Amino acid sequence: MSIHVYNNCIYIYFRTNTVHPNLATFSLLDAVFSADAFDFWARKVHPLWSWQQPLAQIVSKHPESNDAVTLVLKPNRHVSAFIAGQHINVSVEIDGRQHSRSYSPRYLANNHIAITVKRIEGGKVSTWLCNQSQRGDIVQLNAPFGEMTLKERPNHAVFLAAGSGITPFLSLIQAHAKTGQRITLLYWVRDDASACFAEALTQLAQANPAFRLHLLMTQPKDGIASDRIHLAQINALVPDLASTHWYACGPEGFVSTAAALATQLNRPFLGEAFSLPELAASQGEHVQIQLLKSRKTLSVPAGEPLLSALENAGIQPAHGCRRGICNTCACPKNSGTTRNILTQEEQHEAVSGLRLCISAACSDLTLDL
Amino acid sequence: MKNLNKRTLSAQELDLLAKELDAVRARAMADVGKKDARYIRHVVALVRYSAFAGRALLMLSFFPPAWMLGTLLLALSKIVENMEVAHNVMHGQYDWMGDPSLNGQTYEWDLVGTSDNWRTSHNFMHHTYTNIKGMDDDVGYGVLRLFPEQRWKPHYLFQPFYAVIFALLFQWGIAIQELRLGQLFSGKKSKEKFSEEFAPVKRKMRQQMFKDYVFFPLLAGPFFLPVLAGNFVANGIRNVWTYSIIFCGHFTRDAEIFPKSVLKDESRGHWYMRQIKGSSNLEGGKLLNLLSGNLSHQIEHHLFPDVPAWRYAEMAKEVRAICDRHGLHYNTGSFMKQAGQVTWRILRYAFPSKTSSAQLNEFRAESTAS
């Protein structure tokens, strides 16, 4: 809502995108109302109250396997709805800094949201969520994304999961198995202890005849080890291959092997791999810079100051001192690795203010520019 | 003291100076984290509580002590918001937190000037070209003569009077600084260009006027006038305070002014040296640090504008030792002493300055040396 004074009359608008910018010359309401001030006072009353931030509170936490926990989150009204199989960026504050990682959420009863987090060696967010997070803590849940859904309505869906690649499939199975959707899940894990949701999946398989589960252990404590994904194995476990759609989720190597097999058998395929730390490009090599606001992708030499590299590519970012003092050229970096030219420090995380004049690309980057 | 102050370092000495100061910065940045986040959030809380308490007390203006206390609390809130939150946040000191409410590029402050113009005139021009005549508009703000190197004109005779008015209306000065009205009056800037630049400033001015002189007074009903008066006085106190702090930071007796020629191939070490020579500190303890947004450590702020400012007091010990080692004058003194020196400059340079001819020649020689 905004109030405008025009020709000595006061007009009150409920703001829509169609208000002509000239009419919305100034908004007096902005002078006396700020979302930040609202949030400051509202959170004293209730930790989830916010004018526009999508927040959620951890209401319970329980172990799922020896290195994974499930967090049950109570969202506020700003958290966007997602459909089974999508991902959501979870932001948490660790040592004063916001860090964000993608997880696969699923709905529980009373609209609570569950995410399962596997602790990664050296992983800041997963370690914090598994070890430090406590009931009552607040996290931010950003807009959902991802294509791993069953919107194609396949006759027979084959889910290929490796490790924590199981998470999008769990919400898909929970959402679709009870409708009679035919699903076969092949789930590769190292051993019993690292199999998340083994119990929940077994129960789902017992309750829904249309859903078949194959748990494949590559290094079981006892019993026979299964091979990693290969053709004969799939032929043996999945009947009527000709009518199947394939979906794979797991580490990059696993998903690319699955994709190759699907191509070989001429099956429709959808894959999602965990992003691995991007390799630092060496000096002089070219990297791809994706600019979100200007909807452009450019190729620039790695190691060169980004400001001049972008200028050479025909982009004119706002800038001032060109030596890291004035912060004029700072823009958000959503992904990729950069190096600070003055300190030689590498930055792998998303940041809200990357100073282009003293940063060089070490990998492909996504900038909000 | 004067000789020491004017000492110039060789290229090697400057490189060493840069290395040592870079190391001070690196040590501070390595420790940045939870403590800094907690600090700035406490300060934001202080701003919000004091504004709430101040505005609430002003609603009870029928009781004169409530008016006084309310006005002082509102002034405190505005001072801390402008100095310790806005100024430092806009330098990007807290960008690393990833908190959108503390983002340097988008923060909007409680002042009639727009944050966008401030980011240009202050973060870029003033911090890059500190005390360079003709580049750093903060040198006299285009209306005051503070250094003998500035050419004297008859209207400077009146500057002791209009300096007072400038202090009282300081936020309006900041608001129009980047509009460069001089260029409009001399015909160098078209009216169209001016209207375009003025539009966002006009919008911000209206918002601020609406808040302090319409909305809150109306909210007070029968106490419309006392609330309006309280807001007016609170804005005035803030204006005089910020003016004093900024002037004490660069226009004390030993603060130096530089010609444009220093910019030619300027090294990082020389930029550092210029920040030290052009800035001056205020000694006064923790309260002064808070109320000045840690500009009581103007030297450290100019050396490390993107380091969270509450760390300057700690960093100052090392900076001072480095200055001593390099024979650079570390310009510091009490608020009264520094303010006295600034007042002297305003009075002295209202008049033509004979004594400056030697310095002036030196300055001009340097200007043309390039």
Image: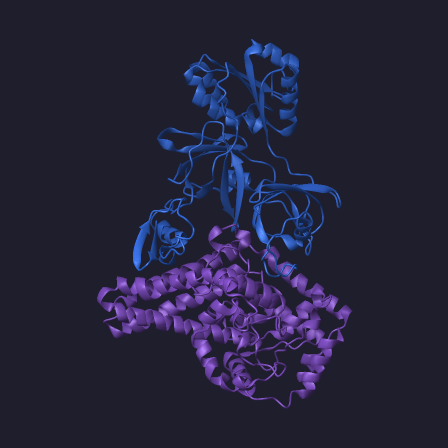
Chain colours: A blue, B purple
Q: Is residue B217 above or below residue A4?
A: below
Q: Residue at x 67, y 80 (%)?
A: B5
Residue that extends furthest to the top in the rendered view of this protein: A240
Task: Point out residue B225 in the picture as x, y percentages from the top left corner.
Answer: 27, 71
Please tell me in which quadrant of the rendered image residue A106 appears. Answer: top left
In the image, taking residue B114 as reference, residue B254 lies left or right, namely: right
Quadrant housing residue B202:
bottom left
Q: Is residue A5 left or right of residue A349?
A: left
Q: Is residue A226 visible?
A: no
> From this viewpoint, which residue is outermost toward the bottom?
B354
Quick check: A303 left or right of B242?
right
Q: Please name the residue shown 71% across and 50% down the image.
A: A304
> Which of the image's four quarters has the C terminus of chain B?
bottom right
Relative to residue A121, is residue A272 depicted above or below?
A: above
Q: Within the image, what quadrant is residue B215 found in?
A: bottom left
| Image position, residue B122 (x, y; %) | 55, 66
Q: Position of residue B23 (x, y in %)?
A: 67, 61
From the viewer's side, name the closer residue of B287 and B304: B304
**Residue A361: horizontal and vertical position, in percent?**
67, 46
